Amino acid sequence: MELPIYLDNNATTPLDPRVLEAMLPYFTNKFGNAASRNHAFGWVAEEGVDYAREQVAKLIGCTEKEIIFTSGATEADNLAIKGVFEMYADKGNHIITATTEHKAVLDTCKHLEKQGARVTYLNVKEDGLIDLAELEAAMTPETILVTIMYGNNEIGVIQPIKEISAIAHKHGALFMTDATQAVGKIPVDVNADGIDLMAFSAHKMYGPKGVGALYVRRKGPRVKVTAQMDGGGHERGMRSGTLNVPGIVGLGKACELCRLEMDEEAKRLSALRDKLESALTVLEESYVNGNVQHRLPHVANISFKYVEGEGLMMAMKDLAVSSGSACTSASLEPSYVLKSLGLSDDLAHSSIRFGLGRFTTEEEVDYAIENTKKAVNHLRDLSPLWEMFKEGIDLSKIEWAEH
Amino acid sequence: MAYSEKVIDHYTNPRNVGTLNKDSKNVGTGLVGAPECGDVMRLQIEVNDDNVITDAKFKTFGCGSAIASSSLATEWLKGKSIDEALAIDNMDLVEELALPPVKIHCSVLAEDAIKSAINDYRVKNGLEALELPKSHH
């Protein structure tokens, strides 16, 4: 076992060597521009892209023509939301999203508010799921788009996508989902789920960074987005720019591997995740964040009360994890996702996200358990709050000097 | 962002972790920060009849820099007179630990903790609390 151990697979995943192998020829002898229609170099590149498009389509149950390649999920989110807002301006200006969305969605919505959009940010329940009745109540005749993420990047909860899309459609709105954390990890079928637009990324599923895709429905209804980048009219006019052929080939291969290995892999990972989680929640005052029934198989988000996340991570020095602690962000604000669950700031500061992945072994999980336990106990020995808690002092009754 | 060696040293081998009897007349306790802000420091000093700090202990809830700042503060406090202790500036801690700008608040908190402990000691011994100038927030 090599140290440090990578348990931050929600941030990014390592490239699968099989994906790398598929990509390599497209950096060297198959270097052509997929848009060069008049010679073999272009044809070979185009073939690679076409094949990748099939591999991607197969994973999510759509046709090849519905895949728009982008530089990643952030661009796909921007293209979908801004593109729908502009394309459907005649129909209305109202967008519905949720407070726990990724910044790529939230900040895009905020941007559109400055351009006349009205945006409703739904709160989530304590378990991180949205309230369907609230969504229903928020729908108006001007609602053109509902955009709710598939699986959450911090806590892994999976939203009731079928129910959400049904509500959107009943009121004549489109349904878009940022499925960056879900595609490749759990079965996602755009038709069964009623998805009109969907953003996802290669590097979260053992593919390369810098490439992703937007699914745009072509039938029932035919969805269109206004291009956000002008140029050569690539990708059916929705996303100009010379195609990143090696990246796209990598995304395709990554999708294929996920499709073939998902069932077994999800079982293996959820068993490892459960092992990790049950071993760590044996520690006093530790809490799992988010709904534990409806969630991705590979994520555990746990708050260890009375220790601060960044300090804790420093003690877990052989583990690469992440924390909702303020100290890990430039803003000094703790995770807005955890706060949206109604978690108090001190619990948000005490959270650690473990993200397991394809290359995580049981031996590594066992090591992580012992290392984390030791770190939590070490930090609690240093924590005045833990001492006060042990003495039976009610911390909420103390007048803290906010600073 | 990588931590400096000194921060790692104090974090890994924190000096003077512990608890002094807060009810003792010659012990001053400072408890500063807030759990909501992600850092709370408790710093205690034991003072002898000559106004010299003979012992110092801390416990801190916070990031590595907060723990290192308080650990270093206790090291500096031991053997100092109250007046010398009052002269400790948060920027001294910043310099010694090579804290980056985003972690300066950790040193501010440590300075506040020192002053708050001294004031607790003063009040316990019939002296008035000092008006403390706001540190570099």
Image (cartoon, coloured by chain):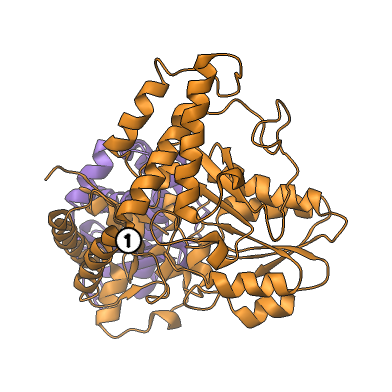
Chain colours: A orange, B purple
Above or below, B42 against A129 in this view is above
User: As drawn, is A357 to the left or to the right of A318?
Assistant: right
Above or below, A60 against A393 in this view is above
Residue in view at x 42 percent, y 55 percent: B109
What is the total number of numbered labels drawn onto the structure image? Answer: 1
Q: Amino acid at mark 1?
A: His
Above or below, A6 against A349 in this view is above
Confirm whether residue A198 shows in the render: yes
Q: Position of residue A133 (x, y in %)?
A: 65, 82
According to the picture, the residue beneath numbered tag 1 turns out to be: A298
Residue in view at x 61 percent, y 72 percent: A164
Residue A55's image quarter? top left
Residue B4's image quarter? top left
Between A392 and A202, the one nearer to me in the picture: A202
- Callout 1: residue from which chain? A
Q: Which type of secondary structure does the marked residue at label 1 adopt?
A: loop
Q: Position of residue A179 (x, y in %)?
A: 51, 56
User: As drawn, is A32 to the left or to the right of B67?
Assistant: right
Q: Position of residue A330 (x, y in %)?
A: 50, 47
Locate the N terminus of chain B by quadrant: top left
Above or below, A15 against A263 in this view is above
